[in-house]
Image: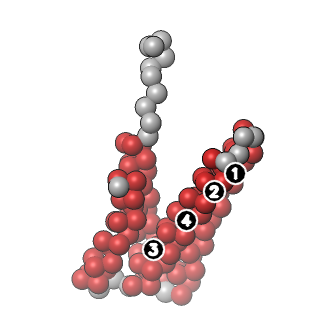
Amino acid sequence: MLKYADLALTAIALPVFLIAGLPLLGWAGAAVGWTGQRLIQHLVEARAARTDDTRGFFQLMAGSIIGRSWFLVISIITVGLIEQQAGLTAAVLSAIIFTCYLVVTLVTRPRSPKVGQS
């Protein structure tokens, strides 16, 4: 379940936006951008897991990182073009969600034995 903490944080941010009177367009932009890029990640990782070609695997994963980043950035920019304050809140929320995702990914990553240990 910890794997989805970033998505839970996205949902939890909605009442915070409502209570604080922040632009809901900012929350929507971050939520759509983040959820969309996570869906793309899931689909690409499923496809990459089915390939036996190492080069193809790395091409898929590298392309995914670049494409997902652009997807999120474009959603933030689009919201910012509609309403500047909403774009700012979308960017800040996206940074917070990304930080949560990064920390959880680092904490839950598979451990490998130290060099020299059996």
- What's the coloring here? secondary structure
Q: CA distance from mark 3 to mark 2?
A: 20 Å
> At x 56% / y 83%, what residue is drawn?
81
> At x 60% / y 52%, what residue is drawn?
45
Task: Label 2: state its secondary structure.
Answer: helix
Mark nearer the N terminus (3 vs 4) = 3
Q: Which mark is residue 31?
A: 3
Is 14 on the left or on the right of 50, as rendered? Answer: left
Q: Which mark is residue 39?
A: 4
Q: CA distance from mark 2 to mark 4?
A: 9 Å
Most extreme residue toward the left is 19
Q: Which mark is residue 44?
A: 2
Mark nearer the N terminus (1 vs 2) = 2
Mark nearer the N terminus (4 vs 1) = 4
Which residue is denoted by mark 1 in the rendering?
60
- Amino acid carrying label 2: it is Val
- Amino acid carrying label 1: it is Leu
Pick the residue in front: 116 or 16: 116
- Residue 74 percent across, percent down from the top left: 60, 72
Q: Nearer the viewer, mark 3 or mark 4?
A: 4
- Amino acid carrying label 3: it is Ala
- Residue 61 percent across, percent down from the top left: 65, 49
- Amino acid carrying label 4: it is Leu
Q: CA distance from mark 1 to mark 2?
A: 7 Å
Q: Are marks 1 and 2 in contact (CB under 8 Å)?
A: yes
Above or below, 101 relative to 94: above
Q: CA distance from mark 1 to mark 3?
A: 24 Å
- Residue 49 percent across, percent down from the top left: 63, 47
Is 98 on the left or on the right of 49, as rendered? Answer: left
